[in-house]
Image (tube, rainbow, N blue to C red):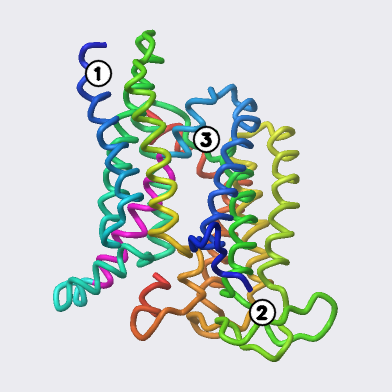
Amino acid sequence: MYPIIHVFNFPILTFGVLFLIGTGAAFLLAVQTARKYHITTMDAMFFGLFAIIGGITGAKLLYIIVDLPNLITSPETALIRLASGGAVFYGGLIGGILGGVIYTRIYHLDVIEFFDIAVPCLALAQAFGRIGCFFNGCCYGIPYEGPGAVHYPVGAYPPSGIGLFPAQLSESAFLFMLTLVLMAVLWKSRNPGFTTGFYLIASGLFRFINEFFRSDPRGAIGFLSTSQFISLMIIGLGILLILKIPQPLYQKYLKN
Amino acid sequence: MENYSGKAAASLVLGIVSVACLILMVYVVTIIIGVICAIIGLILAIQIRKAAQLESFKPSGIATAGLVLSIIGLSLNGVIALPCTLCVICAGGSGALSSLSYL
């Protein structure tokens, strides 16, 4: 829709603005969620910053690895792509998780408690990010002409001239609601890891179902999309956390 | 606290450099320098803050300025360097890279 907005004739990426708003909102929410386990605001903030550092580093490192042949043959164009958007999502995800884990290991903190307080914030940041996806035009839905159908203009990334299912906005709405639910679950939960498990199951299930309503080009593994395949693994991990299987292993072997 | 004055100064300088990279942006590649400087400056500033909490001293103004500038530099440089990281998996990219980005 509006992938770029102009402020005083200066082009700004709409996704970037929403990403910053989402990150800021997530940090503000972390001040509240940190109270559950009596974690200081500073520790919550620094955990988030380490996760962001890890995410950026992981995304860029994995991009460098997969784009190494181009980097060697034409370094100038490869560097420009690296600087202006070259990144791999799963590198960012793994890097973000590792960044947070590294922070808790350095300062001898309980990583499962930190993930519990982080998941409502992560859901909130994702919700804003999905609005950014809507404006950017990626992750678009299947052809659809019912209530809420979205029509993209000519020149946008999604096909124009037809109505599309608002897959990005539906996921954003779900994530906003999930944030509220996770806050309630966090406050009522008695076991570290339960909130994280709940988030993984809920977001994994929704993502699996929402993928059937998307028609943008993306990878596939068999008859499932890549994201659906990964969602199944995420749901499995969430079930393990709900059943309290990883937590005693962490306490016994990894915490100290 | 004397052990941290060098780190504080380094954090401040790196924070200034990362913000300067954003403002100058003569070449897009300066964004990479900005992100790297911001990351290192932020790690140093966080080290000082945690040490201040654990050893009960007040961090200097230089350390605080380094933290703030590094956060600003990282967030703004990062936004330019990662315009739609979450959407790389769904935007498709081009050719082999699109399949590789699904890793």
User: Residue A201, image x and y in percent?
Assistant: 64, 56
Is A65 inside the magenta-drawn segment? yes
Q: Find the distance from the CA under tag 3 to the CA under tag 1.
A: 27 Å
Residue at screen point 17% across, 77% down: A74
**Placement of B12 over or under B93, stated as above or below:** above
Residue A26, compared with residue A73, is above or below; it is above
Where is the C terminus of chain A found, in terms of image quarters?
A: top left
Mark 1: which amino acid? Tyr
Task: Kindly state the secondary structure of the residue where label 3 is placed.
Answer: helix
Mark number, residue A131: none
Q: Nearer the viewer, mark 3 or mark 2?
A: 2
Name the residue carrying label 1: B4
Residue under pointer 3: A114
Callout 1: SS = helix
Residue denoted by label 2: A141
Are the residues under marks 2 and 1 on the same chain?
Answer: no
Residue that protrudes farthest toward the top in the picture:
B56
Which SS class for mark 2? loop
The stretch of residues the image draws in magenta is: A50-67
Q: CA distance from mark 3 to mark 2?
A: 34 Å
Question: Residue at image x 34%, y 35%?
Answer: B42
Magenta part, dominant SS: helix
Q: Of the residues tagged 2 and 1, which is closer to the observer? A: 1
* Residue depicted at x 64% and y 42%: A195
